[in-house]
Image: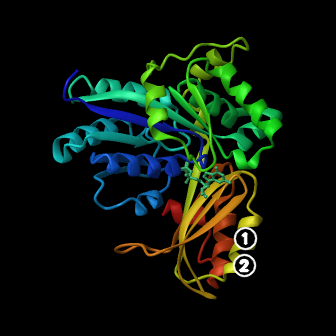
């Protein structure tokens, strides 16, 4: 097909490194004088990742919902609008970490029936340490979703190699190979991969959206539960009215329950100047000093399963020196 815009999907569980890879892809395309466009999807109400993307990159945002179910009609519309309005050379879709890629594949291929887009690849970024942890625990829904994301990939980045030993790296690689016999597996730290090799590897593997069933029969089970696999994922967004003490905030993050597996936010601290983008993924925290453009509130999003949003809210209000006016649950129902 001529004059079609290649589309790449970035998949991978929450916090695995998709945005880290996105920046590397964008830099590479810009170096080649190509105009990339981005579709970003977040479970929360705020697009923190988008704040760090160069303003020259056309962007569509699908917020407060998962692209693979509630936002799927919007995805087609956003793709069509981007192509018509910005004429990009390439489009990359960063799905939420809770998304099942099969639905996104369906959506993009359907869009290509009436808009000149062509799905060229699906890159799944895997947090090697997190996957190994879940494999050892055989932990339910998240583990199955990760399997699904790995099976659908046309290239796999086995990221966060700095968090596993060489023996564990080998163990996780053979596990991933068992679930996906075709995709190139590229081990990486901070998704530092040769983009040219990544693109060439993907060109060899078609994106079928029809993962092979493996010998444990888990595929049949997970296909029947495509949406159920992440229905239980919830997000709580907290808007700050006052700066918080940085040490007290770090202590709060350290004590987050295991059911909160991802958090991000923009914060001002009472004991240090400037504003910070904070990231929390699988018990690791990063703070990056930033200077957001335009109006950006101090806000944090917490993502996980079955955690008490009311409890988090109360703790954060205490950190801010505000007393809770009323419990979060009551507030939502008004
Ligand atoms: N230790 C370690 N941390 C990493 C690596 N790659 C990324 N990170 C950090 O992991 C956190 C999550 O990275 P992101 O690139 O934002 O992950 P993501 O998949 O886009 O996250 P969601 O959009 O929330 O699903 C950030 O704090 C990164 O700096 C790695 O190889 N090793």
Is the residue marked 1 within 8 Å of ligand 1, measured from its CB?
A: no
Between residues 308 and 128, which one lies in front from this camera angle?
128
Looking at the picture, does residue 98 appear above or below residue 156? below
> Where is the N terminus found, in terms of image quarters?
top left
Q: Which mark is residue 248?
A: 2
Q: Say if mark 1 contacts mark 2, CB within 8 Å.
A: yes
Number of residues whose C-alpha sits closer than 10 Å to that of mark 2, classed few (under 14), some (14–19) or many (20 or more): few
- Outermost residue, left direction? 84
Looking at the picture, does residue 277 appear above or below residue 144? below
Looking at the picture, does residue 295 appear above or below residue 11? below
Between residues 294 and 325, which one lies in front from this camera angle?
294
Q: Residue at x 27, y 45 (%)?
A: 34
Q: Left or right: 152 with respect to 246?
A: left
Read off the residue under disc 1.
252
Looking at the picture, does residue 254 appear above or below residue 107? below
Where in the figure is residue 100, as x and y percent of width and height? 52, 32
Number of residues whose C-alpha sits closer than 10 Å to that of mark 1, classed few (under 14), some (14–19) or many (20 or more): some
């Amino acid at each position: 097909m001529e004059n079609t815009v290649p589309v790449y999907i970035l998949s991978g569980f929450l916090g695995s490194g998709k945005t880290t890879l996105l920046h590397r892809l964008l830099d590479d395309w810009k170096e080649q004088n190509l105009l990339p466009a981005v579709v970003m999807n977040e479970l929360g109400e705020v697009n923190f990742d988008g704040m760090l993307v160069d303003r020259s990159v056309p962007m569509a945002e699908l917020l407060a919902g998962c692209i693979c179910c509630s936002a799927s009609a919007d995805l087609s519309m956003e793709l069509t609008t981007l192509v018509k309005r910005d004429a990009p050379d390439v489009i990359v879709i960063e799905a939420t970490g809770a998304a099942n890629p099969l639905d996104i594949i369906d959506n993009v291929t359907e869009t290509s029936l009436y808009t000149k887009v062509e799905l060229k690849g699906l890159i799944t970024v895997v947090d090697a340490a997190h996957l190994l942890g879940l494999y050892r625990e055989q932990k339910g829904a998240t583990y199955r979703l990760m399997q699904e994301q790995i099976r659908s990939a046309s290239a796999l980045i086995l990221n966060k190699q700095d968090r596993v030993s060489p023996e564990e790296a080998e163990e996780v690689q053979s596990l991933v190979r068992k679930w996906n016999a075709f995709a190139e597996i590229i081990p990486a730290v901070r998704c530092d991969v040769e983009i040219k090799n990544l693109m060439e590897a993907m060109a060899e593997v078609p994106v079928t959206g029809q993962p092979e069933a493996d010998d444990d029969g888990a595929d049949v089970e997970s296909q029947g539960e495509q949406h159920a696999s992440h229905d239980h994922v919830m997000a709580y967004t907290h808007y700050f009215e006052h700066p918080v003490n940085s040490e007290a905030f770090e202590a709060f993050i350290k004590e987050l329950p295991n059911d909160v597996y991802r958090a991000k936010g923009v914060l001002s601290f009472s004991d240090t100047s400037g504003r910070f983008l904070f990231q929390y993924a699988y018990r690791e925290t990063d703070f990056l000093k930033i200077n957001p453009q335009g109006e950006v509130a101090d806000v944090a999003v917490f993502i996980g399963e079955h955690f008490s949003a009311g409890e988090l809210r109360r703790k954060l209000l205490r950190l801010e020196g505000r007393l809770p006016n009323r419990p979060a649950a009551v507030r939502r129902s008004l």
